[in-house]
Amino acid sequence: MEFSVQTANPAKIETACLVVPVYKVPDHKSSDLLPAVAKLDDASEQLIGQLVASGDIDASLANVQLLPYAPGLGAERLLIVGLGEREKCHETAYLKALDAAMAALIKLPIDNASVMLTEVPLADRDTGWKARKVLESIERANYRFDQFKRNPAPAASLTQLNLMISNAADAERARQGAHQGSAIGQGINYTRTLGNLPGNVCTPSYLADQAEQLGRESQGALAVDILDEEALAELGAGALLSVGRGSREPSRLIVMHYKGADNAEEAPHVLIGKGITFDTGGISLKAGEGMDEMKFDMGGAASVFGTVKALLTIKPKLNLVFIVAAAENMPDGAATKPGDIITTLKGLTVEVLNTDAEGRLVLCDALTYAERFKPASVVDIATLTGAAIIALGHHATGLLSNDDDLALDLLDAGEGAWDRAWHLPLWDEYQEQLDSNFADLANIGGRPAGTITAACFLSRFADRFPWAHLDIAGTAWHSGKQKGATGRPVGLLTQYLLDRENDVQVENGDD
């Protein structure tokens, strides 16, 4: 989506459609218009204010109405979006209204539109943040996944979006925010596509091909290494290999390097994604109902790919490493069995009590592999435990860490991106649940605190660097009629890395 930032009088701007935010007035006897909207109202002989006051425009939160005419204005039509009552219009309400407006806008038979949603005041949110969210929203609204349908829906005709800014001093900040928002939105959509692909298409080898494609498109900015099963065996990555042993699809460890820091030797930040492209549970077979959704079990890997996609456009001055541990978990005569003992890349032995707890097995070897980069931080992302859904539902990502500063940085990034996480404890008391009579540790710790003990397992392989674990089992996809990948937590991850870039700039006196 192409975008521009304009500071002209909104009443005079020539556009196919102008998106206008309005507040709801409970008594329906008056209107409460934003200053920029009041200019439109004056130019149109109080059309908007009268319709709001009369109740003919329903300004309830996220209600959208099209006025196919705009007398006295340069806009051909108006798309009115309700913000609800002013005092209740905070981030969640604002973003709900924004998404409703963009979903309606993308369906109109127009090629350009202008929006005034950056004019809505939000505490502690500047114009740049609102511009970013507008572009994220329109990119997400423009998403289609119908490549397997004989008659796909027609592509949207909207190609140009203009952001209306009253204060010219905010224009550059709005441009920067919109640039980031467009890149993040495209990264989110890339993540959604990878997640939505069926398991017979999106295999570990397919993910490796996608990494190589990103490397080619980056024009040298992204170097890619692919470790096949022979290389993994030589390396000693027995945990990762054990997961894919029952599948005909060979496992892969995918490593992408981005060097954007002014200091080439600067320690990199590392993201690691769980890439189980389909999870039957292995010998510990899952129930058949809903098993189709286990194609989403590579949501962590998909979010890493989406973050790479966004950052290749934003081009932060950081050194970064992206690792995806990819395998397919299937049951056959060669599959790992409950009770088997495997040796990890770190050298620790693991008693596999449940083959459906496989994500931690591919991640533990990836975490050990990350040690060689002497990382400044490591964050792994995984659809790891159903227990995370029980604890947090589908709103917050579970966060556990061995470093409180890193945890706070990720929580702040989640708030900044409005892609939020919640910090769970990683106390030593939970570690004993992983005790094994026959190996160094077991791969499960029983039903109590399942999300925490899964992170405890991973922490055994992350003792040499600041590390955090994001459990996205409840946030990576929707079920039911809305079935599909969400693209989370690309926003959080991108914001986290942009914040680290800002830290470097502050340390160097550049900010």
Image (cartoon, rainbow, N blue to C red):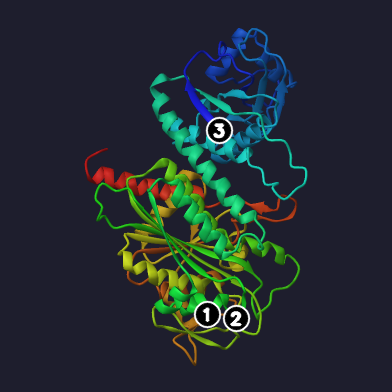
Location of residue 467 by image quarter = bottom left
Please state which of the two labelled residues, at mark 2 or mark 3, is closer to the viewer.
3
Please state which of the two labelled residues, at mark 3 or mark 1, is closer to the viewer.
3
Residue type at tag 2: Asn
Q: Residue at x 60, y 23 (%)?
A: 113
Name the quadrant of the N terminus.
Answer: top right
Query: Going by the picture, which residue comes out furthest to the bottom?
Result: 438
Label 2 and label 3: CA atoms lie apart by 46 Å
Q: Is residue 433 above or below residue 100?
A: below
- Using residue 438 as the reference point, say whether residue 96 is left or right of it: right
Of 189 and 475, the residue lying toward us: 189
| Mark 2–mark 3 CB contact (< 8 Å) | no
Residue 26 is marked as: none
Query: Going by the picture, which residue comes out furthest to the right?
Result: 151
Secondary element type, mark 1: loop
Query: Going by the picture, which residue comes out furthest to the left?
Result: 509
Query: Residue 337's spot in the image, x, y percent?
Result: 60, 85
Name the quadrant of the C terminus.
Answer: top left
Q: For the residue carrying disc 3, how many other residues have a C-alpha within 10 Å: few (<14), some (14-19), or many (20+)?
A: some
Of 53 and 220, the residue lying toward us: 220
Residue 165 in view (yes/no): no
Label 3 and label 1: CA atoms lie apart by 45 Å
Q: For the residue carrying disc 2, how many other residues have a C-alpha within 10 Å: few (<14), some (14-19), or many (20+)?
A: many
Q: For the residue carrying disc 1, how many other residues have a C-alpha within 10 Å: few (<14), some (14-19), or many (20+)?
A: many
| Mark 1–mark 2 CB contact (< 8 Å) | yes
Q: Mark 1 highlights which residue?
A: 443
Residue 354 is marked as: 2
Residue type at tag 1: Asn
